[in-house]
Image (cartoon, rainbow, N blue to C red):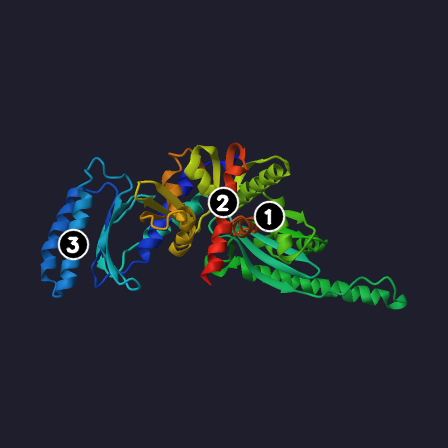
Amino acid sequence: MATAIQNDDSAIEQWKLRRTIQYLSSLRGRGTSLVTIIIPAQSQLSRTTKLLTDEYALSSSIKSPQTRQNVQQALSAAQGRLRLYTQNTLPENGLVVYAGIVYDDEQQRETKISMCIEPLHPLQHGLYRCETHFITDFLMQQIMDTVNDLNARRYGIIVIDGNGTLFARLDPHQGTTILKRIQVSLPKKHGRGGQSAPRFERMRREAIHNYLSKVAENAKSVYINNQQHGLANVDGFILSGSANLKQELVKSDLLGMQIQSKILRLVDVSYGGDNGLQETLRLCTDLFADIKSTQERQLLDEVFCQIKLSSADETDTVSYTIGVDETSIILNDDAGLIDRLIIWENLITKRYVYQKRDKEIIVIVADNEQEAQKKLKTFIKENDNEQIECIDEMNFLDYLTEHYRQMNIRLHLVTDRSTEGQQFRLGFGGCIALLRYPISTSILGSLNNNNHEVDNIDDYDY
C-alpha cells in the first residue's frame, strides 16, 4: 500500500514530458521551416553551434521568401537557446532543441516555438532536420521504454465459467485490455433420466471437452506471438472462474507447454466476464503490485474509504473536497490545508485569473471561457460597471504540476482505465483533495450559493 500513495515526482515529470511531446507532435509549419536539433550525449557543443551557423548561411539560397525568413528565424532562436548552455552544463543524456514558427489553421495565427528538452535516456546519434513538423517519435519511444523497463512483467488473465470465457492482458503501459470474448451454452446436469442418464452425462462431458478445446485454441491465438518464434507474449497467466472449469482446463494439457508452464495462480471468483475480471484484479494485487494501474486502484480504494468514513461523521466539518470547484476554493484560500491531491491526468479544466481595477485578483476554474464568464458574474454582480481583465489563462492541471512542490502538496495523477478510475472521473469530477485537518462546511457553502446564482442567471438568459 505504501507504494501506491507515495508522491512520485518522476511519474509527474514523465507526464509533463509526454504532454509536451504530444503538443509538439500536433504542430505544423508553413513549408519545411520547423527545426529539430538532436545533440547526442558527450557531444561537443561547438560542433552543433558551427552547424547552425553554416545552415543559416545556406538558408539564404531558399527561393521562397517566407520559408527563407521562417527558417532563419528558427535557426536564430535555436542559436539563442544553445547560448544558455556550455560544454560543462550540457545535460548528460544530450539535448533536443525545437524551434520554428507554427501556424494554427483554426485561429489563423502564427506562434513562435523555441524550447529545449532533456531526454530520459542518452541520445546516441545527432540530427538536424527542417520539416513541416517536429521530430518527436524517439522521445515518445523513450517514455514507453521507461515504463516497460520499470514494470516489465505482463500478465494474461483468462476468466472462464459455464457461460463464456474472457481473455485479457494486463501490462504497465496500457493497463487492462480485453482481447477477446467467447460465449457458450453448456448442457446442465441431469438428476433424472433413468437408463438415459449416463448418455446425458456423456454428452455433457463431451460438450465441456469441446468447450475447453475451443478455449485453449483461442488462448493460443490470443497470447502466442508467432513473430517471436512462438513464445508467449506475457510473463505469466492467471486463470479465474466461478466453477471447476479452470482446474479441468489446466489438467487437460490442452493449453500447451508455452502457456501451461507460465500459469501462476488459479483464482476462485464469484462472477464471470467483466465482473470476474475486476474481482480477479482485486484478489491478485500482490502479483500486480508494481503495475501502475494496480497502484492507482489501491490509491483510489483508500481515498474512497476515507471519504466514506468522513461522511459517516455527523458533524459540520469535512476533511476532503470533491471536484475542481471545491478544491480551487481551498487552493485560493489556504493551499497548505491540502495534504494529498488526486486528479485525473486528462482533465481539461482551465484556471482563469481576473484582475479588477483596484488590483483585486479573482481566480476561477472552468472548462471554457464562456463558463468562466458566467461564474465571474457572481463576483461582480453588485457593480455592473466594474472593469475586469483576464490576466492569465492556464490549464488547471498544468498549474498544479508546476506549483505542487511550493504548495507542499502530494500530487497523484491517475487514469480512468480501471473501474475505480472511471468512477473517480464520472462520480467525483476527476479531482479529490484530502485535507490535513477537518474544516467547517461553511467554507464550501459559498460554492453552492454561487452555483445556485449561476443557475438563476442561466434561467434569465432564455
Q: Is residue 445 above or below residue 261?
A: above
Which residue is drawn at the image coordinates 24% and 40% (left, top)?
A: 42
Taking 454 as reference, is 103 left or right?
left
Instruction: Tell me where residue 400 appears, x and y as whole percent.
Output: 40, 42
Q: Is residue 446 above or below residue 109?
A: above
**Residue lying farthest to the right in this orientation:** 194
Where residue 258 sits: x, y (%)? 56, 54
Residue 415 makes an appearance in the image: no
Q: Which residue in the protein does label 1 denote?
A: 281
Q: Secondary structure at mark 2?
A: helix
Residue depth check, mark 3 versus mark 1: number of the one nearer the observer: 3
At label 2, the amino acid type is Leu
Dot 1: few (<14), some (14–19), or many (≥20) neighbours within 10 Å?
many
Name the residue carrying label 3.
73
Dot 2, how many residues are within 10 Å of its Cα: few (below 14), some (14-19), or many (20+)? some
Instruction: Choose between 211 and 392: the one closer to the eye.
Output: 392
Q: CA distance from mark 2 to mark 1?
A: 38 Å
Q: CA distance from mark 2 to mark 3?
A: 48 Å
Q: Secondary structure at mark 1?
A: helix
Residue 59: percent from left, percent from top = 12, 58
Q: Could you say where residue 419 lies in the image, as x and y percent from the top left?
A: 57, 51
- Identify the residue at image location x=23%, y=39%: 90
Residue found at x 50% / y 38%? 443
Task: Quickly name the residue at label 2.
Answer: 447
Q: Quadrant of the N terminus?
A: top right
Can you tell which mark lies on residue 72?
none
SS category of the residue bearing label 3: helix
Amino acid type of the residue tagged 1 in the rendering: Leu
